[in-house]
Image: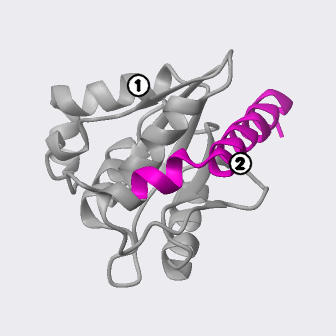
């Protein structure tokens, strides 16, 4: 089972990206999680560019096509989806790779209620299959990098992340 992990943050010290890397590092046997590293390479979406789709967009689309499911960790900016991440989703709207793709939201903050609603609405609009279980949350906001590493390395956190990946795998396989 191959999962693609998309971070909605471009920050080099992003807790969302750190969370996704932690998921990749603890994936149980039979599951791989690849963290996409090209979000900042995508040009601003314009329908005029779709006829000659930029290589960076094709790279994202190929990663989406080649995975069984997507994990998304995204911060909330001004009660919404960060522009760079919304831009990535906009590039996928009229493509064939994203419809029907299972998606699970994971959060590096216990806040972000507005983002969660907005993100779910956009994902439903582009016909993603949203994981129905509770979102995974880790309280990483306002933690320094060492604290983030310590939290994500704790045995109970690792076990919870592994369990959440297994739940998502069952959802993906169920076709629900």
Circle 1 crowding by C-alpha within 10 Å: few under 14, some 14–19, many from 20: some
Q: Residue at x 23, y 36 (%)?
A: 38
- Callout count: 2
Residue carrying label 2: 160
Q: Secondary structure at mark 2?
A: helix
Q: Residue at x 28, y 25 (%)?
A: 59
Question: Per the image, is 20 magenta?
Answer: no
Where residue 164 appears, x then y in whole percent?
72, 44
Residue carrying label 1: 63
Q: In this rendering, would 27 be left or right of 5?
A: right
Q: Quadrant of residue 101?
A: top right
Q: In this rendering, would 175 be left or right of 112?
A: right
Is residue 118 visible to us here? yes
User: Closer to the camera, 59 or 31?
Assistant: 31
Q: Secondary structure at mark 1?
A: helix
Distance in Å between CA atoms under marks 2 and 1:
26 Å
In the image, the segment drawn in magenta is 148-176
Circle 2 crowding by C-alpha within 10 Å: few under 14, some 14–19, many from 20: some
Q: In this rendering, would 30 be left or right of 138?
A: right
Q: Nearer the viewer, mark 2 or mark 1?
A: 2
In the image, is residue 10 above or below residue 109?
A: above
Predominant SS of the magenta segment = helix
Is residue 128 visible to us here? no
Q: Are marks 2 and 1 in contact (CB under 8 Å)?
A: no
């Amino acid at each position: 089972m191959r999962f693609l992990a998309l971070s909605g943050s471009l920050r080099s010290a992003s807790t969302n990206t750190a969370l996704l890397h932690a998921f990749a590092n603890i994936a149980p046997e039979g599951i791989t999680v690849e963290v996409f590293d090209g979000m900042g390479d995508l040009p601003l979406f314009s329908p005029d560019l779709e006829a000659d789709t930029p290589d960076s967009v094709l790279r994202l689309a190929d990663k989406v096509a080649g995975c069984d499911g997507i994990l998304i960790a995204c911060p909330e900016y001004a009660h919404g989806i960060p522009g760079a991440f919304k831009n990535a989703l906009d590039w996928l709207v009229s493509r064939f790779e994203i419809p029907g793709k299972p998606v699970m939201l994971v959060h590096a903050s216990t806040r972000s209620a507005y983002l969660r609603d907005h993100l779910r609405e956009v994902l439903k609009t582009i016909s993603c299959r949203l994981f129905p279980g509770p979102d995974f949350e880790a309280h990483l906001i306002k933690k320094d990098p060492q604290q983030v590493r310590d939290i994500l390395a704790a045995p109970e956190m690792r076990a919870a992340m592994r369990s959440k990946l297994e739940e998502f795998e069952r959802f993906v396989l169920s076709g629900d």
